[in-house]
Amino acid sequence: MHGTTTERLITPARGIGGSLRLPGDKSISHRYALLGAFAHGTTKLTNYSTGADCANSLGCAAALGATVTRGEGRAVEITGTGGAFAQPSGHLDCGNSGSTIRMLSGLLAAQTGIFTLIGDASLSRRPMERIRKPLSQMGAGITLTEGHAPLTIQGAPLTAIDYTTPVPSAQVKTAVLFAGLQAPGTTTVREALRTRDHGELALRAFGATVDRTADSVSIAGGQQLQAIEAAVPGDISSAAFFLCAAALFPGSNLIFDGLGLNPTRATLLDVLTALGAHIGVLDLEDKASELIGTVQVNGPLNGMTGTTISGALAAQLIDELPVLAAIAPYTQHGIRIRDAKELRIKESDRIALVAQNLRAMGAEVEEFEDGLDVPGGQKLHGAEIDSGDDHRIAMAFSIAALRAEGETVIHGAESASVSFPEFYDLLDKIAER
Ligand SMILES: O=C(O)C1=C[C@@H](OP(=O)(O)O)[C@@H](O)[C@H](O)C1
Ligand SMILES: C=C(OP(=O)(O)O)C(=O)O
């Protein structure tokens, strides 16, 4: 096992039911925090993500001179620096958060000063060349440590670029747009597969003009950002665990209010529908260009069928693939995942850990460089799960455990708090035992 500290015992459930309103989306919270720190005026957010990752973005914002106040519940106020960050007194600690280190680098690329960004052991293994390359092409001085964090940024006057991302990554796209905001001329980012568009929408919410085509996003440099007031939509990637749990039990009934339903993030709803779950979406509203609504899911009466996830779907579902793979043995025909080699360089090697943990539960699974084949019609038993201190692995196997025979122990269970500290409490609430 990895350097695990807490264990959680998950017992099988008889069904899933209830009604939930989840904390704010992690991707949107990061962007609002970072742009709030950069903008003029005081940004007032409600339903900010409760995860440790988004707290790291706020910590960096404060270290860079923004005033950050956490209010009641999930409220956060950020008084921005008006486009000029202060030199921090120490390193900027991004913890476990790839989003923080990569997107913040885009903002820092044009700032006066030298900034060192560090992270935990997992983040320090993840590739940073993907941001060094475009940001140094724009003129920033960036040094990495053998391709990884710690990374040091010497801000410089930037030039606009036209950049095609070599791998689908919303973090890289957003980092280049954040730098482009500070570069005279027009910066364009092109992507072969469309990734989540929260960066573009957040820039617009803060008052910037952002132009889009089907496969590109452009921003003109020199635009000033103005503070916003916004409620962060509930996190659909957190809801994914419970949506999948509901899909496991015929007749389950689970409702989410205030859930983020941005089309670049809601693909799981289509996949679960294709697998046989009944999903209804109600009360759709547009909040700062982000869609929010009520989602009701009922488990399929005859169980889930099976599917293949590849290409654009794999990119859109990147954070949901571990839980989809973990429930795949319970489908009739299995789930095949391809074009997802990015999973190997997340908080852990998610392909390897999913395969290892499915096998520990008695499942047959075939591992590929860019995915997995998980046959359907399998019965799992409880097991010792190695989360690799990766939040999405800990949560994915807590869901698989609900239909296993016997008890499952999740090692490194506390890693869930990276994105979803309430996960185990809410799981207890909705699992009928
Ligand atoms: O832009 C974002 O908010 C994110 C993009 C994805 O990462 P990549 O950009 O590395 O694909 C995703 O896995 C991560 O959880 C959040
Ligand atoms: C990969 C993830 O996040 P990040 O890249 O921000 O660490 C995730 O939340 O699954």
Image: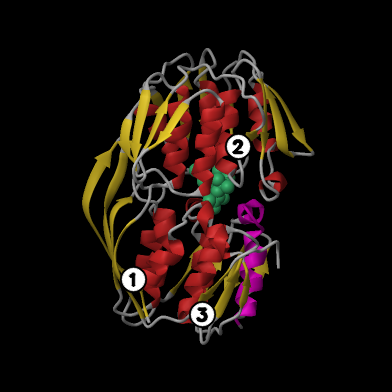
Q: Which residue is mark 2?
A: 101
Q: Is residue 107 visible?
A: yes
Query: Which residue: 49% across, 43% down?
Result: 54
Q: Which residue is mark 3?
A: 376
Question: What's drawn in magenta, residue-wise?
Answer: 341-361
The residues tagged by marks 1 and 3 sit, at their Cα atoms, a distance apart of 16 Å
Q: What x and y, as percent, mark residue 143?
A: 75, 29
Query: Which residue: 36% across, 48% down?
Result: 263
Left or right: residue 123 compared with residue 291 = right
Q: Are marks 2 and 1 in contact (CB under 8 Å)?
A: no
Q: What x and y, as percent, mark residue 78?
A: 41, 29
Q: How many marks?
A: 3
Q: What x and y, as percent, mark residue 279?
A: 29, 65
Q: Earlier in the sequence, mark 2 or mark 1?
A: 2
Q: Is residue 27 magenta?
A: no
Q: Using the image as rendered, state which of residue 33 and residue 250 is in the foreground.
A: 33
Q: Earlier in the sequence, mark 2 or mark 3?
A: 2
Q: Which amino acid is tagged 3?
A: Gly
Q: Using the image as rendered, state which of residue 191 and residue 201 is in the foreground.
A: 201
Q: Are marks 1 and 3 in contact (CB under 8 Å)?
A: no
The residues tagged by marks 2 and 1 sit, at their Cα atoms, a distance apart of 37 Å
Q: Which residue is mark 1?
A: 277
The image quadrant that residue 214 belongs to is: top left
Circle 2 or circle 3, nearest the eye: 2
Tell me if residue 370 comes above or below residue 383 in the rendering.
above
Q: Earlier in the sequence, mark 1 or mark 3?
A: 1
Query: Which residue: 70% across, 63% down?
Result: 2
